[in-house]
Image (tube, rainbow, N blue to C red):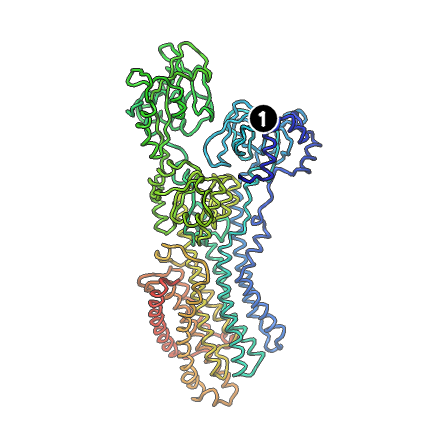
């Protein structure tokens, strides 16, 4: 037995209550509310509006922009540095540079992210067309027009064609009232509404209560009057629209994973370096400060800023490609998405349908059938549906305009019986040139045949015998192909000028019309592109199985096995998690079942995107890792989505996935390469600290080295990305970060040690009197010795760090098989020149650096070349072992 909510019970109560009882229960009347009663109702039941989403508020976005694992780590290190280098340091040794740089980077990266998110929010708000239109109501017996948001429970609302229903309403009077509930159900069917009080025999589901009109649905034709029974978040619309969920944290989880890898390295290295320095140097405070600088050196200071720049750039590029990224973290979701769930209507198919065949009872092409159907569709004044539009579009066919214009001029309408969903047919009475009136009927095959006693074939009329078998032989194959087939019948009414449902008997079956829900021209290409990108498309639709299978087969989605909503209900969660992997088409689904499917895929480890545009899609949009909607979607669906497409086209999605993966790859380049390079520097420092009589590099120099390198890396969001890196989803986590650091970091340390040996035993003695550091007695020479050593390693470390960026940014041979972008090439080369030049300026003294002889740079070139060669060899082994690089 299905569970009922308080909302269900309250709405059901009003559906089964007489209007008089409802007026009494709510405290209103058929004449509407007075001004005093309106204010009382608003205070008692609330206003007709929705509470703002948390992630649409400035303070929520401010918190998310500045509070993340990377910023927290850097902020903590900045505060520690501020305490150690400023508050506890002597006046002579006070240095605010470290703290200032770290805290500045944190502030700048957070500000960039905040600006981008606010820009995305403003763009999304421009799409918001939530109910701000005026509506006609009765108040104190007078008709007045008020903004829909001013409605309260108890208001008497007057509806007419074109209105969007502004609240949940119990209808009390109707006149041919037809309402489209597509915004809530996702189905294109239009429902005729009534004002009758339901009895027990009528109870089905809320959406089948024909005496209720729900918020966000649209009046197609007719008029109605009713009393407001729910407003704002208490409506069916409001119950669906609960977009704040806690499951969309894939970006946060990945960031936490990477942060924890860095913290684990720090937890091991900081105590180790501290103890080592205390043992070898004996200076507790200096050792503690330097061990903290190790933590700063290991953590890429620009990490939040580079990540933010990557995400912001990707978001801006998508904005130029008809896509609004409401949540900047959704760019990462695009990069790691490996399953895309979507409906077929409007995504794989066009919004309308096409008339494919018009045929007689034996399946031969018949212009008579088309002419009769055209007259019926042209003359009935009820609800127009896609079938009518497809039939009427025939008059635009070449060489047919005059024929259909003459047909309309020759046959004049006399009367009609509008379409309704119980009869599933529509009848029109037309006056023919022969003076007789003919009733033309079209609609559902079974309902038409049940009203026919004869069939017509090539001008002759025959009694119906075994007609169902004949019908099956003609239409079954088309039905299996997913076509929509209807029947056409007529009857000579003589001079009768009015018709009623009682006249819809003893009809003559003329033939059939077959309609095709045509796939978009780009659908198959887009599906193939998604598969090439290793994104598995899965269809989650409320449509019938045969129709879905036909469309899926035409566009290349495997539909050999299909799971219906009824079958899904019989499955346990464990069974569903198995079946959801091998089945790609799910039909006849309710909104809750879509959520269950998305959840099952996520539990299996997939990153799931969901493309939806109706109220019924909101739960699944919220459940998915990436919720995707379209500009034409209902407002609550757009509000719940992370991404809004300005075109409902999978081609736009394909571009989003590619851009997401490029963004993702460039973020990983920075994180992995910088972390491994920093780790190599730390290992070098540990080795050098154990044997050198002085620190191999000061804390300020280490910070400056990382800062200069990070400044160059800010250009990485504009780097080229190899096509191979975009052909499969990327995982955003720290799983491979540790192995990358341990594989490539020690290579840097190896060449650092070679440089240490050269500097300590060759270069420094040559420039300081031909003796080693321990043999020096002059303090000035010792300071010069240290400055030469620091400068030599500073330059070697900077050169190798920048050059290795080019070798580890691609799986291929750099410069030959994979070229960096012009911006990356220019920035890195200019950066090396400028930062090397610093050592020849007066500014070098501020950082304890000194000018070195020019021949030293020949040594640097040799070290750099050997380093590149060794890195290339290790890279080949790494890729062979781990089947990837970045």
Pointer 1 residue: 197
How many numbered tags mark residues here?
Answer: 1
> Of residues 539 and 746, which is closer to you in this image?
539
Query: Where is residue 541 drawn, in percent x and y?
Result: 43, 40
* Depth check, front residue: 820 or 258: 258
Figure quadrant of residue 825:
bottom left
Q: Is residue 501 left or right of residue 410?
A: right
Using the image as rendered, state which of residue 724 and residue 92 is in the foreground: 724
Q: Which quadrant: the C terminus?
A: bottom left
Is the residue marked by circle 1 packed among few (<14), some (14-19), or many (20+) residues within 10 Å? some
Q: Is residue 302 visible?
A: yes
Location of residue 708 in the rendering, given as x and y in whole percent from the top left corner: 47, 68
Q: Position of residue 823 (x, y in %)?
A: 40, 60
Picture layout, residue 436 above or below residue 113: above
Residue 784 position within the rendered picture, expressed as x and y whole percent measured from the top left: 49, 83
Element type at mark 1: loop
Q: Is residue 798 above or below residue 603?
A: below
Q: Is residue 269 above or below residue 767?
A: above
Task: Identify which residue is drawn at 59% across, 68% down.
Answer: 79
- Answer yes or no: is residue 402 visible: no
Q: Quadrant of residue 101?
A: bottom right
């Amino acid at each position: 037995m299905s569970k009922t909510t308080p909302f269900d019970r309250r709405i059901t109560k009003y559906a089964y209550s007489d209007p008089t009882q409802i007026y009494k229960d709510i405290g209103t009347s058929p004449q509407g509310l007075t001004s005093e009663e309106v204010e009382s109702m608003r205070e008692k039941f609330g206003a007709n509006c929705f509470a703002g989403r948390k992630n649409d508020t400035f303070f929520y976005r401010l918190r998310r922009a500045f509070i993340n694992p990377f910023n927290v780590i850097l902020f903590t290190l900045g505060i520690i540095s501020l305490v150690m280098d400023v508050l506890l340091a002597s006046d002579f040794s006070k240095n605010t540079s470290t703290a200032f740089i770290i805290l500045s980077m944190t502030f700048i990266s957070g500000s960039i992210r905040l600006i981008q998110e606010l820009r995305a929010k403003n763009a999304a708000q421009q799409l918001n067309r939530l109910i701000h239109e005026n509506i006609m109501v009765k108040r104190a017996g007078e008709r007045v027009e008020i903004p829909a948001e001013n409605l309260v429970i108890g208001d008497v609302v007057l509806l007419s064609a074109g209105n969007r229903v502004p609240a949940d309403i119990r209808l009390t009077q109707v006149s041919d009232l037809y309402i489209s509930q597509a915004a809530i159900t996702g189905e294109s069917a239009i429902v005729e509404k009534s004002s009758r009080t339901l009895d027990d025999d009528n109870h089905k589901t809320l959406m089948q209560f024909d005496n209720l009109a729900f918020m966000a649905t649209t009046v197609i034709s007719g008029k109605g009057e009713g009393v407001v029974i729910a407003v704002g978040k208490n409506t069916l619309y409001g119950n669906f629209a609960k977009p704040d969920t806690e499951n969309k944290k894939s970006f946060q989880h990945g960031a936490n994973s990477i942060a924890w890898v860095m913290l684990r390295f720090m937890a091991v290295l900081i105590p180790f370096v501290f103890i080592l320095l205390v043992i070898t140097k004996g200076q507790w405070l200096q050792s503690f400060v330097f061990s903290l600088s190790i933590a700063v050196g290991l953590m890429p200071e620009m990490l939040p800023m580079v990540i933010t720049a990557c995400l912001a750039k990707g978001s801006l590029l998508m904005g130029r490609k008809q896509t609004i990224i409401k949540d900047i973290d959704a760019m990462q979701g695009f990069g790691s998405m490996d399953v895309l769930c979507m409906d077929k209507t409007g995504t794989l198919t066009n919004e309308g349908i096409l008339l494919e065949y018009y045929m007689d009872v034996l399946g031969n092409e018949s212009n008579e059938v088309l002419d009769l159907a055209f007259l019926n569709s042209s003359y009935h004044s009820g609800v127009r549906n896609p079938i009518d539009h497809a039939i009427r579009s025939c008059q635009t066919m070449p060489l047919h305009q005059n024929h259909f214009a003459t047909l309309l001029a020759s046959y004049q309408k006399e009367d009609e019986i509008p379409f309704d969903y119980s009869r599933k047919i529509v009848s029109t009475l037309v006056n023919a040139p022969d003076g007789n009136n003919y009733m033309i009927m079209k609609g559902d095959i079974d309902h038409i045949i049940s009203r026919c006693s004869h069939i017509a074939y090539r001008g002759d009329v025959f009694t119906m015998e075994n007609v169902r078998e004949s019908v099956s032989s003609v239409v079954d194959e088309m039905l299996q192909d997913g076509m929509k087939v209807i029947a056409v019948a007529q009857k000579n009414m003589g001079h009768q000028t009015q018709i009623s449902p009682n006249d819809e008997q003893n009809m003559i079956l003329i033939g059939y019309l077959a309609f095709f829900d045509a796939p978009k021209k780009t659908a198959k290409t887009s599906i193939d592109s998604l598969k090439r990108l290793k994104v598995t498309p899965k269809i989650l639709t409320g449509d019938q199985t045969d129709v879905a299978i036909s469309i899926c087969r035409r566009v290349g989605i495997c539909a050999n096995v299909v799971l219906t909503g009824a079958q899904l209900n019989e499955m346990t969660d464990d069974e569903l998690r198995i079946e959801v992997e091998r089945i790609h088409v799910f039909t006849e689904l309710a909104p809750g079942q879509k959520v269950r499917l998305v959840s099952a895929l996520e539990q299996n480890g997939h990153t799931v995107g969901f493309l939806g545009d109706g109220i019924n899609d909101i739960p699944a949009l919220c459940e998915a890792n990436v919720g995707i909607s379209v500009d034409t979607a209902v407002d609550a669906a757009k509000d719940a989505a992370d991404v809004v497409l300005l075109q409902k086209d999978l081609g736009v999605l394909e571009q989003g996935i590619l851009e997401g993966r490029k963004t993702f790859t460039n973020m990983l380049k920075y994180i992995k390469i910088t972390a491994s390079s920093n780790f190599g520097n730390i290992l070098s420092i540990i080795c050098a600290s154990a044997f050198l009589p002085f620190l191999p590099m000061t804390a300020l120099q280490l910070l400056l080295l990382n800062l200069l390198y990070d400044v160059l890396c800010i250009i990485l969001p504009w780097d080229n990305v190899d096509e191979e890196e975009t052909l499969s989803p990327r995982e955003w986590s720290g799983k491979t970060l540790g192995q990358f650091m341990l594989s490539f970091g020690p290579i840097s340390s190896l060449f650092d040690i070679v440089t240490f040996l050269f500097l300590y035993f060759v270069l420094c003695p040559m420039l300081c009197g031909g003796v080693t550091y321990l043999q020096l007695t002059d303090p000035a020479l010792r300071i010069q010795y240290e400055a030469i050593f620091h400068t030599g390693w500073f330059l070697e470390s900077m050169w190798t760090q920048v050059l290795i960026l080019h070798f580890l940014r691609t799986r291929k041979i750099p410069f030959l098989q994979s070229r960096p972008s012009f911006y990356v090439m220019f920035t890195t080369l200019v950066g090396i020149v400028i930062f090397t030049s610093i050592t020849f300026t007066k500014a070098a003294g501020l950082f304890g650096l000194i000018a070195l002889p020019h021949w030293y740079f020949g040594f640097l070139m040799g070290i750099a070349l050997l380093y590149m060669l060794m890195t290339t060899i290790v890279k080949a082994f790494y890729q062979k072992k781990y089947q990837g690089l970045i």
